[in-house]
Image (spheres, rainbow, N blue to C red):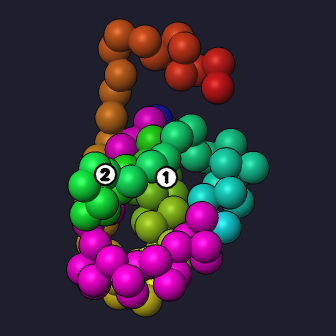
Amino acid sequence: MYSLILIRYRAPLDVIEAHTEAHRGWLRELKARGTLLASGPFVPRTGGALLVRVPDEGAAAALDAVRDGDPFFRLGLANYELLAWNPVLGREGLDTL
């Protein structure tokens, strides 16, 4: 299953920036495991988005675990919206990532 995770900051940008390297380290771990396909900040920088792939079985728990592992979430710096996503066009390209 694919999912979009929308992240919206709850703290001023200078506070976010103080924890950005820890957040990006977490993203690198997700990428190495094959969970994270793409990520990046919004423009203007009010948050960001992740495109992830999790197993179909237990998808909700897997998405919760992705969110719960993020330092931004653990520190209460951001809100998360976890959206299960069924790509119709272009799925074959995603499946090869």
In depth, the one of 10 and 82 nearer the eye is 10
Q: Classify mark 2: residues with Cα within 10 Å, few (<14), some (14-19) or many (20+).
A: few
Cα distance between the residues tagged 1 and 2? 29 Å
Say which residue label 2 marks: 42
Extreme-right residue of the structure = 32
The percent position of residue 93, horizontal first and vertical second, equals 54, 14
Task: Give me the residue at 58% from left, 46% from top.
Answer: 36
Q: Classify mark 1: residues with Cα within 10 Å, few (<14), some (14-19) or many (20+).
A: few
Where, by quadrant of the figure, is residue 37 drawn?
A: top right
In depth, the one of 12 and 72 nearer the eye is 12
| SS class, disc 2 | loop
Q: Which residues are magenta?
A: 2-24
Indicate yes or no whether the magenta region holds residue 12: yes
Say which residue label 1 marks: 58
Task: Give me the residue at 43% from left, 12% from top.
Answer: 90
| SS class, disc 1 | loop
The image's mark for residue 75 is none
Establish if 79 lies above or below 90: below
The percent position of residue 55, horizontal first and vertical second, equals 56, 42
Amino acid under disc 1: Gly
Indicate yes or no whether the magenta region holds residue 37: no
Query: Relative to 4, is 44 on the left or the right?
Result: left
Establish if 1 lies above or below 63: above
Where, by quadrant of the figure, is residue 28 drawn?
A: bottom right
